[in-house]
Image (cartoon, rainbow, N blue to C red):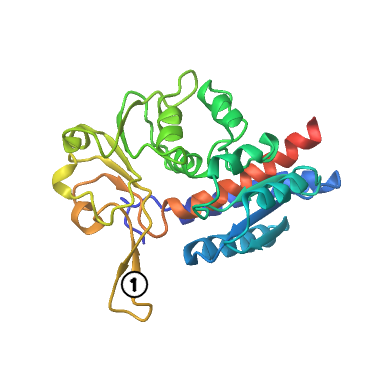
Amino acid sequence: MNDPKVLSGKHTAIAAYESFKDRISLLSTKGITPGLCVILVGEDPASKIYVRTKTKKLKSLGLKSEAIRLESSVQESELISIINDLNNDNSFHGILVQMPLPEHINSQNIINSIKPEKDVDGFHPENVGWLSIGKPRFIPCTPKGIMRIFNHYNIDLSGKDVVVIGRSNIVGRPMSTLVSSSNRGPNGTCTICHSRTSDLFDYTKRADVVISAIGIPNYLKAGMIKDGSIIIDVGINRIDAENEKGYKIVGDVDFNSVIDKVSKITPVPGGVGPMTIAMLLENTIEAAEKAFNQ
């Protein structure tokens, strides 16, 4: 897609991977190969695709990658025991447990059991705290990828009104922290909107930038945004379609509805998604660099 309005996550990811090569080579001269272990619990189709994509990309860059697949019936204590073993395995610098987990497993307990120095998702409370005071150890991959897209396309957020739709710990909350950070940060003015926000569209109609992460297909339409705004679509939603697969992937934003009104927009697929994976690899490389420099 060559539309000048489109912010390509694919192109940004290619540039990011190129920038990783020297860092990987330098670690290699010191006998270090960054390693990531991904744990998949159950048979969720989307999760299986994500894990396969992540491990394939890691291997393509010469990094160590392993996937541990567990039955959905696995007990929380068993999963924590596996994580503890990985915490003590110096060949793995990063540990990622693919979400969502089965209902009988407390996700927060699992996140808490990962050694903060290996929490390349950036979800451990210790890492959330470091991010909140502007000294992140690891930035969660999706928000980090979005910030990298802004940088790649020289989009200045200083003084801009930014609305984030969604308040999850994975995207919404860390995104608001990054957008509003000071000193050398973006210095945007951020508002978090969510399912209980009154007159949500009053906020989006005034926003210079809208970052949508609500998981509702084609939710945001032209009448809900202002002319010339920048739209970041985090949504990855599967809807029925008359094609060979029987479905297609769409975002939270009705792309065809808003394209003539926006100044910039990320597509789905090919927008934020590729950057989430790229930033996971970068966090794994950073974990290896930090482990060496301890």
> At x 18% / y 36%, what residue is drawn?
205
Q: In the image, what residue type sits under mark 1?
A: Tyr
Q: Would you place residue 276 above or below residue 230 in this image?
A: below
> At x 41% / y 39%, what residue is drawn?
168
The image shows residue 80 at horizontal and vertical percentages of 68, 46
Residue furthest bottom as drawn: 244
Nearest to the observer: residue 101 or residue 281: 101
Pick the quarter of the image with the C terminus.
Answer: top right
Q: Would you place residue 285 above or below residue 129 in this image?
A: below
> Residue 30 vs residue 200: left or right?
right
Which residue matches tag 1?
Answer: 247
Residue furthest top as drawn: 183
The image shows residue 233 at horizontal and vertical percentages of 34, 49
The image shows residue 62 at horizontal and vertical percentages of 73, 58
The image shows residue 252 at horizontal and vertical percentages of 30, 52
Pick the quarter of the image with the N terminus.
Answer: bottom left
- Would you identify the image quadrant in which residue 244 lies? bottom left
> At x 59% / y 61%, what residue is drawn?
73
Nearest to the observer: residue 65 or residue 162: 65
Label 1 secondary element: strand
Q: Would you place residue 144 above or below residue 56 in this image?
A: above
